[in-house]
Image (cartoon, rainbow, N blue to C red):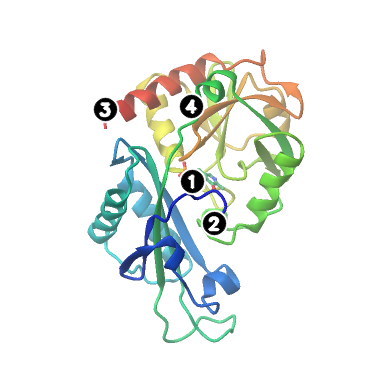
Amino acid sequence: MIAGITGDPLVYLNGDFTPLSQAKISVLDRGFIFGDGVYEVVPVYARKPFRMAQHLERLARSLAAIRIPNPHGAAEWQDLVQQLIDTSGADDQFVYLQVTRGVAKRDHAFPEHVVPTVFGMTSPFARPSAVQRENGVQAVSMPDERWLHCEIKSVSLLGNVLARQFAVDRGAQEVVMFRDGFLSEGSSSNIWVVKDGRLLAPLKNHLILEGIRYGFIEEMAAARGIAFDMRPIAQSEVAAADELMLSSATKEILPIVSLDGRPVGNGRPGPVYARLRQGYDEAIAAL
Ligand code: PMP
């Protein structure tokens, strides 16, 4: 039994659905050997995928960025996601999709003839608890030590794994990372700053993963009349923020109430968070 997984759910591997315990890949898979692959996480509410088109577009962009031919068109991917949802009894799920360059003799350069490995699974999704939503989470600052293609949703996640552990080792739930003195993102989330009623987020460039929630929150801000600026954000501005938030498929949107042991604003989730949270819940209820 794999830690944290109960039962033996069906997973998708290269055209077949098989029990997780029997799904096997070659040790020469370039995902295993080099981290040469990309992935997506699509949240599913009441058995309906949320923002699937945007997730599939980002998957296509990640694949193109590392020159893996997209093994499926959007309709095929949608079909696969639906089939995965159907294998599960859970109403709320997150569907994980991964494509690696495939299996080949170990050599850094791209192999000439190789078939991408396609893997998919779904897991029950425990939405952020009322306690997290109402009390927020703790974060710690750290330098962003990752590479310069953070826009690619790569399975090479060592930098992100070490960043998350940095937080865990300090009793926090997430890091807030800075590169050359400017905000980038969390280990597995985008970070939002509120100052004087304005919502701020870093530029969408190669230094962050453009979250699907990034676009969604941007839309909500426009629809709800929340002033929004996308620009470089200095570490000193983050330290002086009225509110901080994080967003990701699995954390949705959560207030960060302390940074490096100091309260953010008054140490309670703020009014901009409350408005965005309401918008998030309404969008999910309307699915
Ligand atoms: N940045 C990183 C590094 C992430 O891993 C994630 C989670 N996928 C995000 C941002 C947020 O992206 P999304 O809203 O699509 O989950």
**According to the image, label 2 marks what residue?**
2
As measured in the structure, the alpha-carbon distance from the residue carrying label 1 to the one carrying label 2 is 31 Å
N-terminal-most mark, 1 or 3:
1
Which-is-in-front pick, marks 3 and 2? 2
Q: Nearer the viewer, residue 102 or 263?
A: 102
Q: Nearer the viewer, residue 22 or 252?
A: 22
Q: Crowding at label 1, few (<14), some or many (≥20) Cα neighbours within 10 Å?
A: many
* Label 1 close to label 3 by CB (< 8 Å): no
- Residue 198: x percent and y percent? 53, 21
Task: Please give the label number shown on residue 210.
Answer: 1
Q: Crowding at label 4, few (<14), some or many (≥20) Cα neighbours within 10 Å?
A: some
N-terminal-most mark, 2 or 4:
2
Q: Amino acid at mark 2?
A: Ile
Which-is-in-front pick, marks 4 and 1? 1
Which-is-in-front pick, marks 1 and 2? 2
* Label 1 close to label 2 by CB (< 8 Å): no
